[in-house]
Image (cartoon, grey):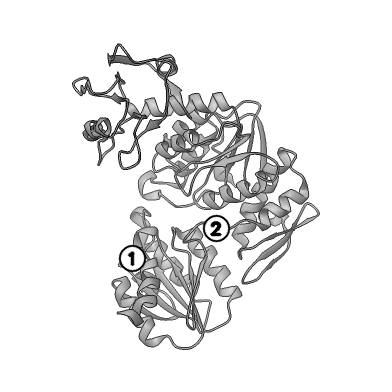
C-alpha cells in the first residue's frame, strides 16, 4: 500500500520535524521497517523493542535512498532525507497506518486465535475462502503486532476477505490486535496450557484468548469450540456458534488423510488426525456463515497443506520421519501421539523433546505424557532435553534419554535399521529439524 505525506499527517498524531521545501507532498511511497530489505524511495519507520532499536539504522536507511523517516527521538535529524516525522511511539504509528489500510480496503476480516491449532485453522480458512473470494492471510505464523501490520500492508487493494492470526504471550495483546483489525468474525480454536508459565492459570489464558471479541463488530459473529473456558469468559453479545467434535460422524483416519461427515456432508482432509477435524468444523461453520458453496468447502479442505514442521514427512533410505516439532504443549503432544500411534504400522520410534512455557508444573506435564504412553507396547521412545527425560522416566515403554540432538541423531544412525517410521515432537526451541539433517548428512561427513 502506498501513502502520501498528506495521508500520514491526517492519519497520525505526529509532528513534522523537517521537510525540504522542494518536496511534493502528494508523492506516493511505501513504508519500510527493515533496512535489510530495499528502502529506496520508501519511508523508513524504525521499530523499537526489548532487544532491538531500528532508530540505530536511520542514517543507513537515508543512505540507501529512503526519502523520509519516522522517529521517536527528536534529536535524530538527518536533512539528507526529504522529510522527518516525529511520533511518540513508532509501533502505535505502524498499527494506526495498518488500521487505515484495513478501513480503506475494507475487507471482511476473520480473526483466529487459540492455544494450538490456530495456524492450521487459518490455513484451512484460506484454502476454503479463496474458492469464492479474493482472500489474503497472515504469512506463516506472523501473529504479533508487527505481523498484523505486515499482513495489512501487503494486502492487495482488491482483497475481499482478510484472515489474521492472533498470538499472545500476555493479557492485553490480543485485545490490541483486535483493536486495530476490527474483525467481522472471531474464532477460537481451543483453550490449552500453552503460555501458562506467563499467565499462571487456564482461566487467565481463556480471558486472554477471549479478548479477540473486544473489538469484534456488534453485528459480527463468534465461532469457537464448545468448552466452559470460552463460554464463561466471553463477553461478546452478538451471534455465537459453538462447535463440538462429537458432531462429526464416521471419522476415518489413515496415514495420508482424514474423512468425516458433518451436517450430512462428507469431507476429506489430506492430513491425519482427529484434531484436524475439530479445526475443520470451525472452518466449515465460518464458510457456511459467508454462504460459501458446500462443494467449494470440500475442495478447499481437500487442498489444505500444513506449513513446515507440521506433520512434515521426510523419507531417507528406510527411515520415514514425521516432523511435528513446530511447537508443543500437553494438548498438542497428546493429540499427535494418539494419531501417530494409531495409524502407523510398527516398527515405530518416538523422539520427544521439551515442551516449553509450562510454568511451575512443567515436570508434571511431562510425567503425564509418559503415563499416557504406558498404554502402548512395542514402541521405542527417545527423549531429548532436561524436561523430556521425565517422559522417559514415567513410562513403561523401552526408552533412552539424550542430552542433545546430535547424540540422538547418532543413535538413530547406528541403531535404527530397516523400514521404520520416526515421529519428532517438541517445542520449536528444540530445533528437531537438526536431527533429520544430521541423519541425512551422515554419509557426507
- For residue 243, say whether it is visible: no
**Quadrant assignment, res 291:** top right
First in sequence: mark 2 or mark 1?
2
- For residue 121, say whether it is visible: yes
Query: Label 2 vs label 1: CA separation?
Result: 27 Å
Q: Within 10 Å of the Cα at label 1, are there few (<14), some (14-19), or many (20+) other Cα atoms?
A: some
Q: Position of residue 21 (x, y in %)?
A: 30, 11
According to the picture, the residue beneath numbered tag 1 turns out to be: 387
Left or right: 364 as drawn, with respect to 71: right
Quadrant, the C terminus: bottom left
Q: Position of residue 2 (x, y in %)?
A: 46, 27
Left or right: 90 as drawn, with respect to 109: left
- Residue 306 - label: 2
152 w.r.t. 328: above or below: above
Q: Position of residue 303 (x, y in %)?
A: 65, 56
User: Judging from the image, what secondary structure is the residue with disc 2 in?
Assistant: loop
Q: How many marks?
A: 2
256 w.r.t. 191: above or below: below
Out of 44 and 48, give the one closest to the viewer: 44
Q: Residue at x 50, y 41 (%)?
A: 209
136 w.r.t. 281: above or below: above
Left or right: 137 as drawn, with respect to 302: left
Q: Residue at x 49, y 34 (%)?
A: 152
Out of 224 and 282, give the one closest to the viewer: 282
Q: Position of residue 91 (x, y in %)?
A: 35, 30
Tag nearer the camera, 2 or 1 = 2
Amino acid at each position: 500500500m502506498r501513502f502520501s505525506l498528506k495521508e500520514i499527517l491526517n492519519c497520525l498524531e505526529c509532528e513534522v520535524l523537517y521537510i525540504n521545501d522542494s518536496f511534493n507532498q502528494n508523492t506516493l511511497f511505501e513504508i519500510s521497517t527493515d533496512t535489510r530489505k530495499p528502502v529506496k524511495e520508501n519511508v523508513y519507520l524504525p521499530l523499537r523493542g526489548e532487544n532491538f532499536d531500528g532508530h540505530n539504522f536511520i542514517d543507513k536507511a537515508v543512505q540507501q535512498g529512503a526519502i523520509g523517516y519516522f522517529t521517536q527521538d527528536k534529536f535524530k535529524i538527518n536533512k539528507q532525507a526529504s522529510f522527518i516525522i516525529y511520533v511518540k511511539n513508532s509501533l502505535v504509528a505502524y498499527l494506526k497506518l495498518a488500521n487505515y489500510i484495513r478501513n480503506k480496503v475494507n475487507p471482511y476480516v476473520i480473526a483466529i486465535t487459540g492455544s494450538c491449532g490456530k495456524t492450521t485453522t487459518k490455513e484451512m480458512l484460506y484454502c476454503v475462502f479463496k474458492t469464492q473470494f479474493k482472500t489474503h492471510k497472515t504469512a506463516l505464523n506472523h501473529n504479533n503486532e508487527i505481523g498484523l501490520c505486515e499482513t495489512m500492508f501487503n494486502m492487495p487493494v482488491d482483497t475481499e476477505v482478510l484472515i489474521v492470526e492472533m498470538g499472545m504471550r500476555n493479557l492485553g495483546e490480543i485485545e490490541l490486535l483486535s483493536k486495530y483489525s476490527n474483525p467481522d468474525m472471531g474464532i477460537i480454536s481451543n483453550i490449552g496450557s500453552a503460555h501458562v508459565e506467563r499467565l499462571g492459570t487456564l482461566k487467565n489464558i481463556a480471558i486472554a484468548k477471549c479478548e479477540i471479541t473486544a473489538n469484534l463488530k456488534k453485528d459480527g459473529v463468534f465461532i469457537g469450540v464448545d468448552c466452559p473456558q470460552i463460554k464463561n469468559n466471553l463477553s461478546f453479545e452478538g451471534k455465537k456458534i459453538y462447535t463440538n467434535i462429537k458432531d462429526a460422524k464416521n471419522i476415518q483416519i489413515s496415514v495420508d488423510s482424514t474423512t468425516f461427515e458433518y451436517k450430512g456432508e462428507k469431507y476429506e482432509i489430506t492430513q491425519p488426525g482427529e484434531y484436524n477435524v475439530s479445526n475443520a468444523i470451525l472452518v466449515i461453520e465460518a464458510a457456511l456463515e459467508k454462504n460459501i458453496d458446500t462443494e467449494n468447502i470440500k475442495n478447499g479442505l481437500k487442498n489444505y497443506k500444513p506449513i513446515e514442521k507440521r506433520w512434515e514427512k521426510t523419507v531417507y533410505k528406510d527411515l520415514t520421519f514425521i516432523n511435528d516439532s513446530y511447537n508443543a504443549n500437553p494438548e498438542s503432544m497428546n493429540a499427535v501421539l494418539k494419531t501417530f500411534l494409531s495409524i502407523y504400522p510398527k516398527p515405530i520410534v518416538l523422539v520427544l523433546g521439551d515442551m516449553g512455557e509450562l510454568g511451575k508444573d512443567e515436570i508434571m506435564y511431562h510425567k503425564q505424557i509418559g503415563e499416557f504412553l504406558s498404554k502402548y507396547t512395542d514402541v521405542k521412545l527417545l527423549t531429548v532435553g532436561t524436561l523430556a527425560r521425565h517422559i522417559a522416566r514415567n513410562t513403561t515403554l523401552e526408552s533412552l534419554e539424550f542430552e542433545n540432538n546430535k547424540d540422538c541423531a547418532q543413535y538413530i544412525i547406528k541403531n535404527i535399521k530397516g523400514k521404520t517410521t520416526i515421529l519428532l515432537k517438541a517445542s520449536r526451541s528444540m530445533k528437531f529439524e537438526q536431527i533429520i539433517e544430521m541423519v541425512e548428512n551422515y554419509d557426507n561427513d
